[in-house]
Amino acid sequence: MLIPDRIKTIMKANQLSPSQFADKIGVQRSSLSHVLSGRNKPSLDFLSKIIQHFPKVNASWLITGEVREGEFRGEQQEVTKTTRHSKSPQHSQSIEKIVFFYKDGTFREFEPTDL
């Protein structure tokens, strides 16, 4: 699946026409049309606008078609580890959300109230 196909997947998942999608991310409709047709490749700014307006979209998936696990952590960030079966983690933690990413590029998000 190429980037234009992944953009079409996002549009379909959000039930947006190309015009609505272009307006939502703040690009000219002709720019979106050129990207979707394969005439032009999307710029970094174009892809950034998609990611900003659709925070549930995995950036790696949008760019490469692959979902990568993990995240970059700068040296200054402290990483707290707890064991999988630990009943009492060192720090009080609560779950904000759980996201399942599927190999077909789709995802499903759950919040504590959904569980």
Image: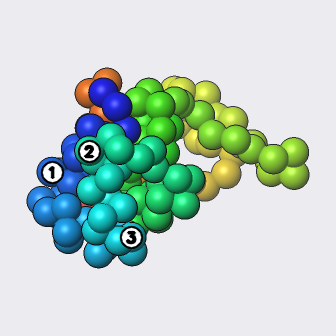
52 is higher (above) or lower (below) than 70: below
For the point 43% across and 36% down, which residue is it? 61
Q: Position of residue 7 (x, y in %)?
A: 30, 47
Circle 1 sits in a helix, a strand or a loop, which is it?
A: helix
For the point 32% across and 53% down, which residue is it? 34
Read off the residue under disc 1.
Answer: 12
**Camera-nearest label, 2 or 3:** 2
Read off the residue under disc 2.
Answer: 37
Mark 3: which amino acid? Val
Front residue of 96 and 41: 41
- Give the mark, 2 or 1, whose residue is nearer the N terminus: 1
What mark, if any, has residue 27 been given in the picture?
3
What mark, if any, has residue 74 been given in the picture?
none
Mark 2: which amino acid? Ser
- Disc 2/disc 3 C-alpha distance (Å): 16 Å
Front residue of 93 and 17: 17
Mark 1: which amino acid? Lys
Q: Is there any visible trace of residue 17 in the rendered image?
A: yes
Circles 2 and 1: CB distance less than 8 Å? no
- Which image quadrant: the N terminus? top left
- Give the mark, 3 or 1, whose residue is nearer the N terminus: 1
35 is higher (above) or lower (below) than 28: above
- Give the mark, 2 or 3, whose residue is nearer the N terminus: 3
Q: Residue furthest front?
A: 39
For the point 70% across and 41% down, which residue is it? 72
